Image (cartoon, rainbow, N blue to C red):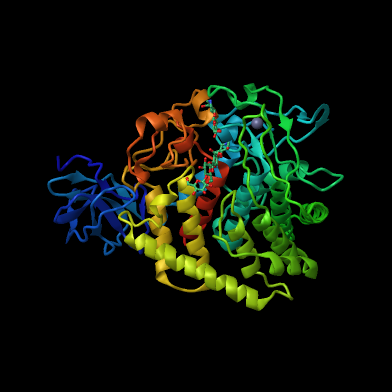
Amino acid sequence: AENEISDDVHVNQLGYKTLSKKIAVIKGQYKKFQVVDSKTGVAVLTGDLTGNPKDESSGDTVCYADFSKITVPGKYFISISGLGKSYDFLIDDNVYSKLGDAMLKALCYQRCGTALTPDFAGEYSHAECHKTLAKFYNDETREIDVSGGWHDAGDYGRYVVPATVTVAGLLLAYEFYPQVFTDAVRIPESGNKIPDVLDEAKYGIEWLLKMQDSESGGVYHKVTSRVFPEMTTMPDKDVDNQLVMSISTNATADFAAVTAMASRIYVTIDPVFSQNCLQASQKAWEWLEKNKDFVSFKNPSDVASGEYGDSSGKDEKAWAAAELFRATGNEKYNEYFTDNYQIEGFGLGWQNVSGFAAIAYMFSDVSGTDQKKVDEIKKAWLDKADMFASTGQKDGYLVAMHKMEYNWGSNMNVATHAMHLLISDRLKTDDKYIHTAEDCTHYLLGRNTLNQSYITGFGSKQVKKPHHRPSAADLALNPVPGLMVGGPDSALEDDVAKSKLSGKFPAECYIDDINSFSTNEVATYWNSPVIFILGYLNSNRLL
Ligand code: G3I
Ligand code: 9MR
Ligand code: ZN
């Protein structure tokens, strides 16, 4: 047994950077561990296992093998006498560089309104999709070109609210770690002298611009078919009518935020685009000014596609104001932000965007920025980071997740907590922020109770059957690589989860089953925070 892989020995299945803290989490109680060089079979370190906490999220009692001492690049495994060994992993400073490229390229595989040609998409290529004019849900005689953007997830719907979150993640990744992003990810624009991350973000933004009503400035909530197509439908074979749904406050405010952000980031790289984005953003703000009452979005009874509903637009509007203030220096936006922003959870997901608003304002260098407000936000931001760090220390798997946070898209919670911590690192130097963010990454790549890597194509125990229509329908053996699945959802929100996962602990409520959309679907806004994290992890990458 000792020479066999044990599902109870958990490591980051890709590996660790040379100078990082390196810990394996072992389920059960054992005494000693060895780190073995997997090429030579020689044990390079023998050590004592420490700790015996009971992990509340998985019910596991665990102990730890700390092998941080090993800094020599190579391929290793952990061996526990009486139990078995871990998967092989690397110690190497470039251990995450391929992953960073793949997760960005995965968004390119999600592109709509274009063919994925074999020269860059290989076995995942398909013909142009969803290119015909869309009809208005309220008046099917009216048609509009809203082609482009990304398929949101495992379905082919295109939704403004989550797409803005994807864009924001990409633009922030570039803003914080510009040196990491190359022009060689092998997307269609590679080689155009613009970092591919900005090309990819622009692909999404150009579609967002089409979703704005040119008269009022309001932004349509989504364009989707009435019902989801069969799982075995390739994008180019999905010919159901695409319907444009009504304008909502949150689509409009999120749109105003990311277009203002884009106007700043592309200002020298693509001045015309930057200018268009700014105008569109201001126009969206005009709509918000004229429509002060919250306009929610609810699916009509004959529409079953994703709803992305919300009960408040306050955080979205504050985000828009903060970004517009930064882009223009105009006091009216500053005033709106300082009067209305409420520190509420600092979300970095589709429903709570107050974290994006906070980032926009904390890092503003525009004159007129209210320093007192900045300090107040920074303090609360760092308090939250301290809370994440202490949650991570208490967690058996060292992940900054409370047991109640394992809901639909829990991996996004893990990733956005890491993102929060990495932004904290720019506000205050404290090693625990970096360590806890790395610990979150280790969780996503296999150091979890299921010994499961949650990103397709990466790790030793990979996701093989994501709820992702192209992967289900194409002829390729493996799913489209570089996509993160939602992960454990203790609310059991699909039939497979209900029948296979009942009675399990929260962190165990995941199944690699094509029909488990509540645990095993992918989404563009789940990739984007990981792209941000990988920006940090690869920022010392040796090119
Ligand atoms: O709001 C409650 C919160 O108060 C509570 O603490 C928490 C505990 O379970 O649940 C929260 O609600 C969850 C909500 O997401 C917000 O996180 C719901 O249970 C959960 O059903 C809901 O899931 C969303 C799901 O759509 C269903 O609406 C996911 O966040 C969202 O990512 C997902 O998005 C889908 C699109 O609809 C369609 N396209 C695919 C995409 C990914 O699966
Ligand atoms: O494929 C759909 C996925 O993108 C959504 O997240 C999910 C929840 O809205 O719904 C999936 O579609 C399923 C539908 O809800 C119920 N019938 C089966 C569909 C495919 O599994
Ligand atoms: Zn499409």
Q: Does residue 11 appear in the picture of this structure?
A: yes
Indicate the quadrant where residue 374 lies.
bottom right
Front residue of 303/186: it is 303
Indicate the quadrant where residue 307 lies.
top right
- The outermost residue toward the right is 215
Quadrant in the picture for the N terminus: top left
Labels in figure, total: 0
* Vertical placement of residue 16 versus 461, above or below: below
Image spot of residue 532 (x, y percent): 53, 55
Image spot of residue 446 (x, y percent): 35, 46
Q: Is residue 182 left or right of residue 537?
A: right
Front residue of 499/237: it is 499
Q: Is residue 179 left or right of residue 341?
A: left
Tell me which residue sits at (68%, 22%) in the image.
240
Q: Does residue 363 appear in the picture of this structure?
A: no
* Vertical placement of residue 214 versus 332, above or below: above
Image spot of residue 537 (x, y percent): 46, 58
Q: Is residue 21 left or right of residue 475?
A: left
- The outermost residue toward the bottom is 372
Image spot of residue 168 (x, y percent): 63, 53
- Which of the four quarters of the rendered structure image does ligand 2 lie in? top right
* Vertical placement of residue 519 versus 381, above or below: above
Tell me which residue sits at (59%, 24%) in the image.
229
Front residue of 183/228: it is 228
